[in-house]
Image (cartoon, helix red, strand yellow):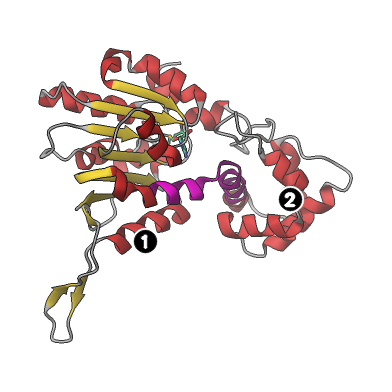
Amino acid sequence: MNDDGYHVPVLLNETIDLLINKEIVDHVVVDGTLGGGGYSEAICQRFESFGVKNYLLICIDKDENAIRYSSERLKNFSGNIIFEKGNFADLKMILSKHKIQNVTGITLDLGLSSYQLEKEDGFSFMRNTTLDMRADKDNNLTAAEILNNYSENELTEIFENYGEIGNAERLSNAIVSYRKSNQFSTTENLTEVIDSEYSIDKKNRIKFLAKIFQALRIEVNGELNDLNKILNDSSELLRKSGRIAIVTYHSLEDRIVKNYFKEKSFKEKKSKYGNSSTESNSPEFSLVNKKVITPGYKEISENPRSRSAKLRVAEKL
Ligand SMILES: C[S@@+](CC[C@H](N)C(=O)[O-])C[C@H]1O[C@@H](n2cnc3c(N)ncnc32)[C@H](O)[C@@H]1O
């Protein structure tokens, strides 16, 4: 499989430009979502083009395939890279294993790689595969397990909270009825239950299925917990002037990042006389981009998967 076949990186230049603070000399950067190595490669190339030789890049992915593929792709930079098959939520532990106290940059490009969507099982409703959805195949929980074993209320909560599906009870009820005489094992089992319960036109059907698959994937992979965990650890793990750059692909993730950065950064407060003053709330970060960055028309037309991407970057004070 060629480079572009694994994954086309989204908002690549925008992310790397803002991630690397040029005022820092000794760089120790974490790519917490290695995927096909597009970001990592660009980070190494950027350092080399600045003439920086003495940098360290820690590449983490919970998917063994990403580690295998990218360690081959990045072999020219291997002297400057540590590869870790693991969860970015465990960054503190990973760094302490390598006796690294703090870092100058953390980047996360959340969600799935194209490889996972197209070649691994369960992530896409466009292909009939087993209902797996695990990015980390060492974990036990699969989407099939959830559909076959979670209570009706638990299913409703997942579809409501992680898929933002209205009247999610109807969906969970259809799932529970199906499993009285069947077991969920393939993506088609699930799409058939949905198609027999709802009659919706093609465009809305795709949107609805995407929400359902998103909800299950978030539950299987503990995605929001992982994001909250690394955000909460980031202030302690970043050196002064170090940066964290996060690309999200749906509103649940973006809301978490946006609120966290807002809460931890300076707040401009207008007094009743119209003067601007700074609240003294012992901020830990400042926002690098005040306005969220999204892909332009060209990127979206060349890579439609980029259309929902949002980049936010903050700097440790
Ligand atoms: C969108 S892809 C990243 C693409 C990458 N930026 C590139 O340029 O190729 C997301 C990757 O993050 C990984 N991932 C998602 N959540 C993770 C987590 N909590 N810990 C480690 N890896 C994670 C996925 O397995 C996937 O390979």
Residue 87 drawn above or below residue 72 = below
Q: Amino acid at mark 1?
A: Asn
Q: Amino acid at mark 2?
A: Tyr
- Front residue of 15/56: it is 56
Bounds of the magenta span? Answer: 210-231
Tell me where residue 213 appears, x and y as whole percent: 61, 45
First-in-chain label (1 vs 2)? 2
Q: Main secondary structure of the magenta part?
A: helix
User: Would residue 40 be found to the left or right of residue 228 on screen?
Assistant: left
User: Would residue 298 be found to the left or right of residue 211 on screen?
Assistant: left
Q: Residues within 10 Å of mark 1 (few under 14, many from 20)?
A: few
Tell me where residue 284 appears, x and y as whole percent: 25, 57
Q: How many marks?
A: 2
The image's mark for residue 16 is: none
Tell me where residue 292 appears, x and y as whole percent: 29, 54
- Front residue of 285/176: it is 285
Residue 13 appears in which quarter of the rendering? top left
Residue at label 2? 150
Task: Find numbered disc 1 in the image and state the secondary structure of the residue it sits on.
Answer: helix
The reply to whether residue 8 is in sight is: no
For image coordinates 19% across by 28% down, the residue present is 46
Residue at label 1? 259
Q: Assess whether residue 58 is covered by the magenta stretch.
A: no
Separation of residues labelled 1 and 2 (CA atoms): 31 Å
Tell me where residue 223 appears, x and y as whole percent: 51, 45
The reply to whether residue 23 is in sight is: yes
For image coordinates 17% across by 26% down, the residue present is 47
